[in-house]
Amino acid sequence: MENKVMHNLSWDNTCIVGFGGHAKDKLLPALKRVGLNINGVVSRDSRLNIDGAKTFSKISDAIKFLPVNTLFIISSPPDIHYLQAKELAMAGKDIFIEKPAFTSIKNLNELCNLANENGSLILEMFMYFENKAVKQIIKILKNDNNSINSIDLKFYIPSIPSGTFRNESTLGCSLLSDMGCYPLSLLAMAGHDLSNLNLENVREDVGENLKFCISGKSKNILIDIKIGINDDYLNNIAIQFKNNREIICEPFFYGRSGYRKLIEIEGELKNETKIFEKNAYELMFSKNRSDWIKTQKDRLNQMHIVTESLVRLGKQAGLR
């Protein structure tokens, strides 16, 4: 007889689906530190030995043999998220999915319907939302629309880690979706319309440096997004106000513990505040299931907004 998922409970157990470098270096340590058992891994690598967790070659076996209230964490390449999440949602399982969760509106709609029908939680893992500095910035973006002149977002990394899925063959395997989903998710969370954002330059290849520039307007605010590969690491947001005041926060799209700089500039005056952030992955995993359920409707709406924007920008970039 099939076990019924006990949706009134949070999770004592987790199963990681797809065990690459990100899962090994960031997800696994965070799960351990918050006290969640890793009792299953779904991987093609049968040699994996992760603290006694059972390795499954198929999701169906993990569903069958793991406890009913196991949280499944999808950390596989985006192009296979849909089929994996569909199987889990049909079984009524709760699912955390690495960003970008989906790069197809049709697939996202189907998963949302399955989640509603079966009582599943679906969370796209934008860990940076757990940071105190980010929450301050979102509050400013929501409350000060009439006084903001422009929002500039920069996210550059020196190189693409070896052995990852980013090969630019599809939208799901592209730098555009992998990095672009961060600033788009922030703007969606702050209530901005992304439909007027477009690629200013489609693809700029300078040696091995691939860059994307996205710009446009929302609520009469100029928005400029720059992402890609650059010699220097850059990860910040700069908000310019109509009275020439400016607020900068860096590093912004970031999950590890450490200090964030919040810089306020007004005329010749400059004030810098350092905010210590706990590990955002740990904060995300330690939050109670009931708290995530309360925000599910809004989060899924924001996922639609971001996914629609990624699909449109992907077409402009010539990505299928």
Image (tube, rainbow, N blue to C red):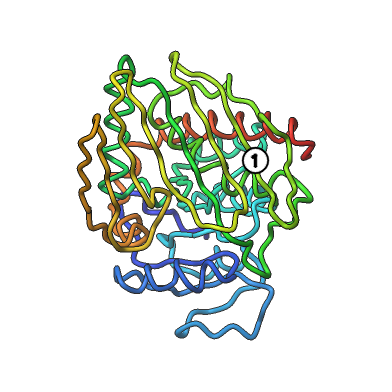
Query: Which residue is the extreme one toward the front?
Result: 268
Q: Of residues 27 and 69, which is closer to you in this image?
A: 27
Q: In this view, does 91 lie to the left or right of 208?
A: left
Q: Is residue 220 left or right of residue 320?
A: left
Residue visible at 60% across and 36% down in the picture: 108
Q: Of residues 315 and 223, which is closer to you in this image?
A: 223
- Which residue bears the numbered disc 1? 212
Q: Is residue 267 left or right of residue 29?
A: left
Q: In this view, does 260 lie to the left or right of 157?
A: left
Q: How crowded is mark 1: few (under 14 residues within 10 Å), some or many (20 or more)?
A: many
Residue visible at 74% across and 30% down in the picture: 316
Q: What residue type is labelled 1?
A: Phe
- What is the x, y in percent for residue 317? 74, 36
Q: In this view, does 200 lie above or below 86?
A: above
Quadrant including the C terminus: top right
Q: In this view, does 29 lie above or below 111?
A: below
- What is the x, y in percent for residue 173? 70, 52
- What is the x, y in percent for residue 153? 47, 38
Residue visible at 40% across and 31% down in the picture: 298
Badge 1 marks a residue whose secondary structure is: strand
Q: How many labels does the image show?
A: 1
Q: Of residues 157 and 256, which is closer to you in this image?
A: 157
- What is the x, y in percent for residue 41? 55, 72
Q: Is residue 34 above or below residue 110?
A: below
Q: Of residues 270 and 172, which is closer to you in this image?
A: 270
